[in-house]
Amino acid sequence: MPRKRILILLLLPSLFVFACAKLPGQDQPFELGALHFGMSVGQVKDAFPGKEITLTAYDTPRGESWNIESPFGDRPPAPEWLTRATWRIACSFWDGKLFRVRLYLKKDAAPAPAALKKKFDRAYHFVADQSQQEITFYEYETPMMKAFVTHGAAEGTAVAFVDLPAYRALDEARKRWQQQAAASFEVFGVKFGMKPEDVEKTLNHGLAPSDFYPGLDCRKWLDEANDRGWELGFDKAWGLSAIAFVHQKRWSPDLVRAKVLEFTRQFGQGQLKNDAAGYTLLVDADNIRLSLIVIGCNRDGCIVSEGWLWSGPAL
């Protein structure tokens, strides 16, 4: 038998396996190497001994996400074309159980979004193309799982697998938690709906005129003891409707990270927006929008402001 023909015959089994390699959760419960839905945080950590595992976000007190850097090393699980290109995974838990696994792909090794879509189209039921401008966002579903393909200029390419029953249950639970958190919201005793004189009494300090919030009656106070500038906006009908802290000292990366975790634990995960100056974290929860603005970072830290906007009494 010719040598070339023998080589082709030897390669055929591996080519067949690659062509037929199934995606996680396709025709069977979700598994990706040692990962499967329902695992505890401790079980996931045990599955990746020696790896750097970091808490990155809360999703109200009942949810949390952990990042695992360089998770698979030299022995990536099937499907290798996906896991070999993965440089980080994010594992999200609700009530202590793993319900979402997101894979971040290396920019120089990730398949193009169009190629990923072809593979996902064969494996799962296509639900919607929610792409906008430069952001690619494909949604898929199986009877027990959701899957997403995303691609953005800054974030690169990522794929996510979500336990569908858990996703539906936590979505309703998250809404209830956000409503409760919004109803009980206060900052150092200051609550939405207060009048200026009520705020002055609560803070035990006078307020000066300001123009920080367009369209609102604005007042300010520099709390020098805490290096915190207060900016308050009052609506004629509803009273206090906007609060901002402009911090006078630069924050270290650890302090910024702690504040992000505090925000997301209180109200849930939000949306991160990047620009040349820095980034903004926005969290929408019921009738309150939280914002954390981080700009001008250098070796001395970052300039930080945090704010809360109220859309009025909940209907």
Image (tube, rainbow, N blue to C red):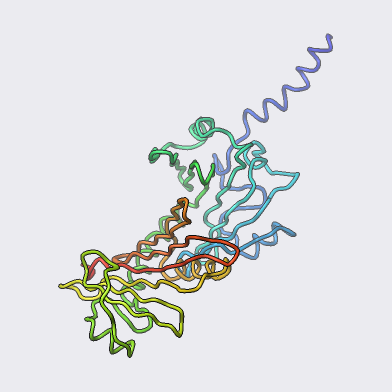
Name the image quarter holding the N terminus: top right
Nearer-the-camera pick, 155 or 34: 155
- Vertical relation: 52 (above or below) 32: below
Residue at 32% across / 69% down in the picture? 179
Which quadrant would residue 54 be assigned to in this image?
Answer: bottom right
Percent from the top left, x then y, of residue 180?
A: 34, 73
Percent from the top left, x then y, of residue 251?
A: 53, 70
Which quadrant would residue 236 be assigned to in this image?
Answer: bottom left
Percent from the top left, x then y, of residue 299?
A: 60, 63
Total numbered labels placed on residues in the image: 0
Residue at 46% across / 64% down in the picture? 59
Q: Is residue 311 left or right of residue 12?
A: left
Percent from the top left, x then y, of residue 148?
A: 48, 44
Q: Is residue 218 left or right of residue 250?
A: left
Q: Residue furthest top?
A: 2
Residue at 76% across / 17% down in the picture? 8
Residue at 35% across / 79% down in the picture? 186
Name the image quarter holding the C terminus: bottom left
Q: Residue furthest left?
A: 237
- Vertical relation: 234 (above or below) 121: below
